[in-house]
Amino acid sequence: MRVEGQVLLVIAAFFGVVALVYWFWSGETSGTALLTGTCLLGTLPGGYYFWWSRRMKPRASDDPSAKREDGEGVVGTFPSSSIWPFVLGVSAALVALALVFGFWTAIVGFVGATTAVLGIIRESRRGGVV
Amino acid sequence: MANVGRMSRPSENDGRAGGKRRPWRLAVPVLVLCGLGALLSGCNFNGPTFGESHGVDVQGHDIAKLYSGMVIAGLVVAAIVWSLIFWCIYRYRRRGRDEIPKQFQDHPLLEMTYTIIPLIIVIVIFVFTVITENEVDSLSHPAAATVTVTGFQWGWIFHYHDADGLTVRTTGAHEDLPSAYTASIYPQLVLPDNETTKIILESDDVIHAWYVHAFDFDRFAQPGIHNEFEITPDRIGVYPGQCIEYCGLYHSEMLFSVAVVSQKTYKEWLSYNEHHQGTQPKHFTKGFDETI
Amino acid sequence: MTTLVTHPESLSLPEEEHGTSGLLKWITSTDHKVIGKSYTITAFVFFLIAGCMAMLIRTQLASPDNTFVSQHVYNELFTMHGSIMMYLFAGPFAFGGLANFIVPLQVGAPDMAFPRLNALSYWLYLGGGIIMLSGFLTTSGAADFGWVAYAPLSNSINTPGAGPDMWIVALILTGFSAIFTGVNICATVFYLRAPGLTMFRMPIFTWNMMVTGILILIAFPVLTSALVMLWCDRHIGSHIFTVSGGGVPVLWQNLFWFFGHPEVYILALPYFGAVTDILAVFSRKPVFGYRGMVFCTIAIAALSTSVWAHHMFTTGTVLLPFFSIMSYLIAVPTGIKFFNWIGTMWRGSITFTTPMLFAVGFLIVFLFGGVTGIFLASPPVDFAMHDTFFVVAHFHEVLFGTAVFGGFAGLTYWFPKYTGWMLNDKIGKVSFWLMFIGFWVTFMPQYLLGEKGMPRRIAEYLPSTGWATLNRISTGGAYLLFLSVFVMLVAFGESWLKRKERPAGDNPWDAHTLEWATSSPPPHHNFYWIPPVRSERPVWDHNHPDHPTVKEHAREVRELVGVGAGTGARGGLAEELPPSSAGGTSAPSGDGHGPVSGNGHDPTGESK
C-alpha cells in the first residue's frame, strides 16, 4: 500500500508545484484551475492509501519474501456472468442519445438503467447467476 | 525451452553493463552540443532547411537558423541512437538455441550519464529557443506601417493604417470564392521592403490562421483576440499565403498572397488607392513592374 | 457468483455457466478475457474502418485540384479518421484490449477488480463507437470540425446538425468507458497482486498500464466536462465558448488539450510497456534499468499533463517558455527509456520473431517521431510548422509507431495467450516488412511537404504549389500500409485454419511474466497455480533456476520451486499441470511443487 500511496502523492506534489509556478508566471486561470484540480486528484487517494499503509499489516503482495501460503484466504467475490452491465450500457447510450434526438429515448433509457442498477444490487446481495 | 540452464555457467549478477566504460558515449553528445552552439551563434549561418524557407524577412531568418540547427542536432542524435539499435540487432542475434546471455540489469553510472546528457542538450536547445523566440515575438521595432488583417469564412480583409490615418481595404471575394478559385482573384497583402510592418490579426467568425511559408510564420486569427506581431521583409517578391487552421467547408480555398514591394512603390500604391477608394487595387504578380 | 478461496483443499474452481451459449454468453460475460478479446476485435474493426478513410483521404490528395471526394465529404473523412483512430482504436485497443486481457494475468489475479464495471465499460465503448459512426447516416453527415472540435467552429451556427451532436455524445460515452477502465486497472493493480508481487516486481507493461489508468483519471473527466459545456453552447443557449455572449473560445483549446496531450501518452505508454516486455523476452535478459523505466513512466505521465498549451503556441495567448521547457523535458525520460531499451538488447541473445520485429520497428520509427517532436516544442519553429503536414507526419509517426507497430507487437506477442495457437510467423514478417517500408514511404514525404508549407486538412491544392509529386509518393506508401494490415489479417486467418497444427503451449516464447504461467488460453479464473514471485520475472526464475534475475534470491527460488541446485531448468510451468479445461472442478494435486494453491490474497487484509 505504501508504494501505491507514494506514487499518487508524488504526482500530487508535482502538480502542486507546477500549479504554483504556472500561476505566478502566467496568471492564467483555466490552466491553474486544472492543475490544482489534478493536484487534489492525486492527494485524495494517495493520502488515503498512505494513511492506511501506516495502520495495516503489510499484505502478502507488499511483502517481498511472501510465500504462497501467506496469500491464502478469500481472493474476492467475482460474478461469473451478468446481463446487467449490458442493459445498463444500452440504457446509458439511449439516455445519451436523448441529448441529440430529444428526450423520448431518455424515458426508455432511465427505465432500463434503473432496472439494471437494481438488478446489480440484488445480484450482489443474494449471489446467484444472471 | 527445456534444460537450457545446464548449458551455460551460472551467471554473475554484478549489475555491470559489461565491464568496459565507453567514453565515446559522452564525447559524441558533447560534440553535438558544440556543433549546435557553433551553428546557432554564427550570424551568417545559412544551413540546410530541407525545403523550409530561409525566410524573406528578418524574423524568418532567425526561425530558419534555429530550425536548421535543431534539425542537424536532431539528426545526429537520432543517427547515434539508430546505430546503437542496429548494432544490437546485428551483433546480438541468437547464435544457438540454448544460448543464455549474462543476466545483468542495471548500471547506475551509465544510467546517470544518459539522464544528464539529454538534460543538458535540452537546456541548451531551450536557451536558443528563448533567444529566437524573443527576437521573433518582440514588438519593439518602430513600426513603419500597420495593417489589420481580418479573417472570415472564407477570405481576408486587409486594412492599412497609414501614417495619416487613411485606410485601404482589400477584400477577397468570398461569396463566389469556391467558383472563383483562381490565383488572380485571391486577395493580396502589400508590404514595404526593409521596413517593419505591424500586423494586427482578428477574426470575424471562427478561428483562422495567417500563414506565409516564405516568412516561416503563422499566427491564429481568433474572434475576441487581437494578435499583434511584426514582419520585416527584406526581399522583394510575391509570396503565397493561406489560412492554415481548419475553418470549415472551404478552408482549402482561403488563399492570399503577400507582395513585398520597395518602400517607394508601397507609398505610391497606398496613395493611389487612397484616391481611388472602391476600385480593386493593383494586383502584383510574379516579376511585377514597379509602376502603379 | 464465485468466491475464490485459496486453501488448496477447498479451492473451488468456477463452473462454467450452463444453459447460456453463443450470443447470450458473450453479452452476459464478465470475464476479463472475453471482454478483452471483444475490445481487441472491436478496436481492430474501428482501425480498419478509419484506415479505409485514410485511403480515401490519401487518394484525394494524390493529385492537385482533385475532385475524388467533395470538400464536405473530405472534411468529414479527416474528422472521423482522426476521431476513430484516437478515441475508438488506439486507446481502447491498449487499455481496453491488451490491458484487460493481460494485466490481471500479469499480476496473478483471477479477474479485474470490478468485473461488471468492466463489462459496462465495453458496452459503453461499443455504444459510443456505433453512435459516432452513425453520424454518417444523418442528413447533414458526420461531424466535420476536426477531431479537436475547436470552438467556435464547433458551435451550432457553424456546424449544425445531428452528426456533430452524435460525435459529442459518443465521446461522452466512450469517455466514461475509459474512466471506468482506468479505475478498474488501478484497483486491480493495487489490490489483486499475487503474494510477493510487490509494486517494484510488476512487469513494466503492468506499471505502464497503471500509470495510464491514473492519466485517464486525470484527463478524461476534463474532456467529458468540456463536451458537456459544448453541448450546452449548442443546445441550451449558454455562451461558454462564444465571444458574442461574453464567452472565451480559447478556453475550449485549454480544456481540450489538457485532455488531449495526456491522451497522447495514454495511447503511447501501454505500447511502451508492451515493447519493453517483448524486447526483454526476445533478448533473454531482464529489462535494463527496471527502476529507471518505472520512474521515467511516472515522469512522462506527470510532464505530459503540464504541456497542453504547446498545441497552442500560435494562438498568441499562452506562456511560451513554460510550455516549451516542459515539453523539452519530456524528451529526457523518453530518451532514458530508449537507452534502457538498447541496454535490454545489449549483449542479449536476440531472436527475430514477428513481435520482436514489430517492437524493433517501433524503436526505429518512434525515435524519429520523437526527434521531430522536439523541433515542434520550440515555439519559433512551431510558428513555421504549426498545422502544416510536418505536424501531420510527426504525430502519425509517433502514434502509428506506438499504436500500430507497438500494438501489433503486443498483439502478435500475446496472440498465443489469447487464442492457444501460434501465429504464422512468416506471413507476420511479410506484414511487418510491408508496413515498415510503407510507413517511411508514406510519412517522409509528408515531412517534406510540411517544410514546403502544405497545410493539413486541405481538400485540394493548386498545381502551382509543386506538392503533387511528394503527395503521390505518400499516397503510394499509404496503399502499401493498407496492404500490410491486410496481410496481417491473412496471417490471423491462416493461423485460425491451421490452429490444430500449431498449439501454442503455455509459454512458447520462454517468457518472463506470470501470464505465461497458466495455460493458453487461460482457464476461467486464470490460475491453478502460481510460481513463487521473487523478482519481476517469476516464470523465468522458475524455468531457469541457474540464471536467476536477482542473485540474492536464487537459492530461495530454487527451494521454493522445489529444484535442487544444479538440477537445471524446468520445462514450461503448466505443462506439468493437468490440462486446464475451463470447467475443471478438482484442484490439481501437487506434484513436487509444494502445495498447489490458487492466487492467494486477502483483499480484506487491511482490516486485520
Image (spheres, coloured by chain):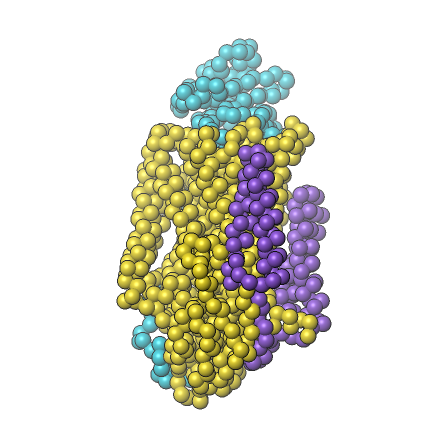
Chain colours: A purple, B cyan, C yellow
Pinpoint residue A18: horizontal percent, then vertical percent. 66, 53
A114 left or right, relative to B17: right
Pinpoint residue C323: horizontal percent, then vertical percent. 60, 48
Q: Quadrant of the C terminus of chain C?
A: bottom right
Q: Could one spot residue C550 in this view of the protein? A: no
Pinpoint residue A125: horizontal percent, then vertical percent. 62, 61
Toward which corner of the image does residue C411 lie, by quadrant?
A: bottom left
Q: Nearer the viewer, residue B163 or C506?
A: C506
Q: Is residue C202 above or below residue C464?
A: below
**Residue at 66% of width from left, 55% of height from top?**
A41
Q: Nearer the viewer, residue C343 or C540?
A: C540
**Residue at 62% of width from left, 63% of height from top?**
A7
**Residue at 65% of width from left, 53% of height from top?**
A38
Q: Is residue B105 above or below residue B136?
A: below
Pinpoint residue C248: horizontal percent, then vertical percent. 64, 34
**Residue at 55% of width from left, 71% of height from top?**
C4
